[in-house]
Amino acid sequence: MGKTAIVLGATGLTGGILLEKLLADKNYSTIKLFSRSSVKVKSEKIEEFIVDLLQLEKSAKDFTADEVYCCIGTTASKTKDKEKYKKIDYGIPVTAAKLSKKNGIETFVVMSSMGANSNSSVFYNKTKGEMERDVLKQNIKHTFILRPSLIGGNRDESRVGEKIGKIFMTIFNPLFIGPLKKYKMIHPEIIANCMKILANNPKNESIISSDKILLIANSK
């Protein structure tokens, strides 16, 4: 019997790539997807739960697995209401971590962001930092928080500011060397690789910076 993984955010860019990798891995027999819409990917490994992720606690009985991957995230331009923004970027990962702890899941891997800081005066960074803090409070045996820099790749929705940032980063990426490596734009496939490697080869550290994401992803 293979492993069971839960993926939150499989309809997104990084989550979708991660799903493909888990489906292709013979060590996994079941991939549980919790989302508000279907990923429209057909596989006998997939179990889909179409739910309101803002009320994830209602799915506690189905939230059982060997490991959880949380790829949830929104943007200020997409979710202008700060209260709703926090319910998504803070509420969903923290609720997932609490369910993981309650149901005895020992591996929890979550995407955060570079600059996350619970004491920050910047709302986005503060929200991510508070999420990290409260996920770690659950004391799940293997907890990994990834802090990628700007994520490359093509999204379905239009994010003008992000597109401009990607153009800038593509031009100047070669200049980010040494201590500046962690600021390089990073591809979602690298993040997905890193998440899967960490879940199957646990490290001692919980906070994984963008440059370390790249190192880990290329280690296998």
Image (cartoon, rainbow, N blue to C red):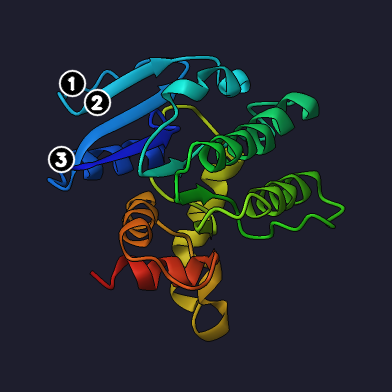
Question: Dot 2: within a 10 Å radius of its alpha carbon, few (fewer than 14), some, or many (20 or more) residues?
Answer: some
- The kind of residue on which mark 2 rests is Ile
Look at mark 3 in the image and give the residue it sits on. Answer: 1
Residue 40, horizontal then vertical, whole percent:
27, 18
Nearest to the observer: residue 205 or residue 87:
205
Distance CA(mark 3)–CA(mark 1): 20 Å
Question: Dot 1: within a 10 Å radius of its alpha carbon, few (fewer than 14), some, or many (20 or more) residues?
Answer: few
Pointers 2 and 1 in contact (CB under 8 A)? yes
Up/down of 94 relative to 81, above or below: below
Look at mark 2 in the image and give the residue it sits on. Answer: 46
Residue depicted at 43% across the width and 50% down the height:
152
Residue 134, horizontal then vertical, whole percent:
70, 48
Distance CA(mark 2)–CA(mark 1): 7 Å
Look at mark 1 in the image and give the residue it sits on. Answer: 42
Residue depicted at 54% across the width and 59% down the height:
149
Labels 2, 1: front one: 2
Q: Is residue 26 left or right of residue 156?
A: left
Q: Is residue 143 left or right of residue 22?
A: right
Nearest to the observer: residue 6 or residue 121:
6
- The kind of residue on which mark 1 rests is Lys
Labels 3, 1: front one: 3
> Can residue 79 be spotted in the picture?
yes
Q: Which is more N-terminal, label 1 or label 3?
A: 3
Distance CA(mark 3)–CA(mark 2): 15 Å
